[in-house]
Amino acid sequence: MPELNFEIVQAEVPTYAATPMLLFQLRVSNEDAEETIHSIALRCQIQIAVTQRHYSPRAQARLLEVFGEPQRWGETLRSLHWMHVGVVVPQFRDSTLVDLPVPCTYDFDVVGTKYFDALEDGEIPLSFLFSGTIFYSGEQGQLQIGQIPWSKEAFYRLPVSHWHDMMNHYYPNSAWIRMHKDVFDLLYAYKMGHKLLTWDDTLQRLLYTASKEVEP
């Protein structure tokens, strides 16, 4: 049974992807270099190791919805599940490099998006947990099948700038908010009724009106 090891070498934002995406370059190595790995159906669970970095007062305020009051972070600060991804690793013997594509969303109903957007600088600590199926040659050359144990993992610190650069490329000076259709219909009726040209104008008008209502 092959003894595989995994390492995230680097991450980059592809220039011409159709949607926001991060590419993590993954090195897969086999301790028995004489063994031929025909392919690997690799699965990966990515977690955000939130306890592995410092948070500025501004970041703490923006993460209130995720972790609650900073005074309670000793209880609430736990690793966040980000996503599951998969890739097929082609044939190799000693080691190989493969791109692990990770699609990203700017939906602020997603906890990961809230977390990434709250950070100003530094690095995002990520934990990659691997599993999957290995197809390899046995001692007599026959095809063998084995499973990757969940104990196989890798750690990588993603620069926060990668996330912000990516989202600024796809959504320059923009953000997305998902809402129920009935709420949208009411908002649209307000926009039309007040002859407002843009959604920014509509929301600014509502915020201005609300601020006036709470003034003493």
Image (tube, rainbow, N blue to C red):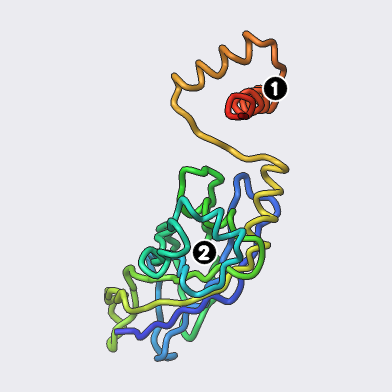
Query: Which of the marked residues, 2 or 1, is nearer the chain's N terminus?
Result: 2
Task: Name the side, left or right, on which 149 lies relative to 18.
Answer: left
Which of 147 and 138 lies nearest the eye of the viewer?
A: 147
Residue with the mark numbered 1:
198
Callout 1: helix, strand or loop?
Answer: loop
Q: Residue furthest top?
A: 193
At label 1, the amino acid type is Thr
Q: CA distance from mark 2 to mark 1?
A: 39 Å
* Kind of residue sitting beneath label 2: Leu
Residue 87: horizontal and vertical position, in percent?
45, 62
Judged left or right of residue 69, residue 163 is right
Percent across and percent down for residue 20 are 60, 49
Q: Which residue is mark 2?
A: 100
The location of residue 44, given as percent across then percent down, is: 40, 65
Residue ID at (45%, 54%)? 66
Q: In this rendering, which labeled residue sits more in front, label 2 or label 1?
A: 1
Q: Quadrant of the N terminus?
A: bottom left
Mark 2: few/some/many CA within 10 Å (<14, 14-19, 20+): many
